[in-house]
């Protein structure tokens, strides 16, 4: 096999892996989008009816519900795709997002609970919700780049930039939960588009 034939084979294998990862990802976009929209509306409704922001602690239940459901869906699939460079990149993107999002949340909680700290007012006004969704949009866009899928790239951009627009329209109030609702709906739409692309 010549060098050009080897390169063509590697390229074809990577493209096939990208397509398979994207095809299987559609249902997970839909799952996480529905959960994100549901939890955001639940937190918003409870926050609005009681006037207490501590309902934001319900966000910790999202992974407790989502991961078992995702595992159940994955276990019903045909045999898993072998780990490859593309799947490792996509996994690394979302692991990095998780670390950054949790770090930003922890930093915000730490400095807003220490009321007399000079950074408390700055961090409280920094918009934790919009920062997390902006990171989410960035992770989704980079995933779209890695998978060479225009729908995922555009959805990530719309999620990230759309969240900033919603934040500035609603301000730092309970209505900012609609940023997560918006992100969830975009995620569901992305999953439906991906499923349509791969039917």
Image: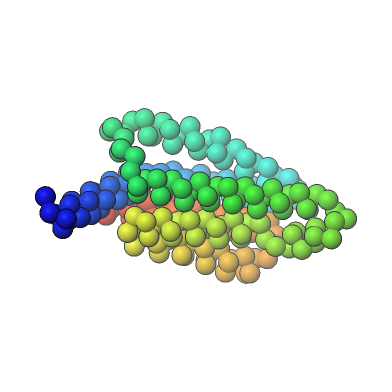
Q: Residue at the location (68% across, 65% down)? A: 171
- Say which of 93 and 47 sits in front: 93
Left or right relative to 19: residue 156: right
Residue 38 location (% of width, % of height): 54, 46
Picture quarter containing residue 168? bottom right
Can residue 174 be seen? yes
Q: Residue at the location (32% across, 46% down)? A: 21
Residue 130 location (% of width, % of height): 61, 60
Residue 169 location (% of width, % of height): 62, 69
Q: Residue at the location (30% across, 50% down)? A: 18
Left or right relative to 32: residue 165: right
Vertical side of 79 occupied by 184: above or below: below
Vertical side of 88 occupied by 170: above or below: below
Outermost residue on the right side: it is 116
Residue 199 location (% of width, % of height): 23, 49
Can residue 49 be seen? no
Q: Residue at the location (55% across, 39% down)? A: 63
């Amino acid at each position: 096999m010549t060098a050009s034939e080897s390169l063509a084979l590697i390229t074809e294998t990577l493209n096939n892996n990208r397509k398979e990862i994207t095809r299987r990802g559609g249902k997970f976009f839909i799952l996480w989008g529905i959960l994100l929209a549901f939890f955001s509306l639940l937190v918003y409704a409870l926050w609005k009816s009681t006037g207490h922001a501590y309902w934001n602690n319900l966000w910790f239940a999202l992974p407790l519900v989502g991961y078992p459901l995702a595992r159940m869906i994955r276990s019903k699939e045909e045999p898993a795709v072998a780990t490859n460079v593309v799947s490792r990149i996509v996994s690394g993107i979302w692991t990095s997002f998780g670390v950054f999002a949790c770090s930003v949340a922890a930093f915000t909680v730490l400095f807003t609970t220490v009321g007399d700290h000079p950074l408390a007012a700055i961090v409280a006004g920094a918009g934790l919700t919009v920062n997390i969704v902006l990171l989410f949009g960035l992770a989704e866009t980079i995933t779209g780049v890695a998978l060479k899928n225009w729908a995922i790239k555009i959805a990530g951009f719309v999620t990230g930039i759309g969240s900033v627009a919603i934040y500035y329209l609603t301000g730092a109030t309970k209505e900012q939960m609609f940023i997560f609702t918006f992100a969830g709906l975009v995620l569901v739409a992305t999953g439906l588009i991906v499923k349509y692309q791969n039917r």
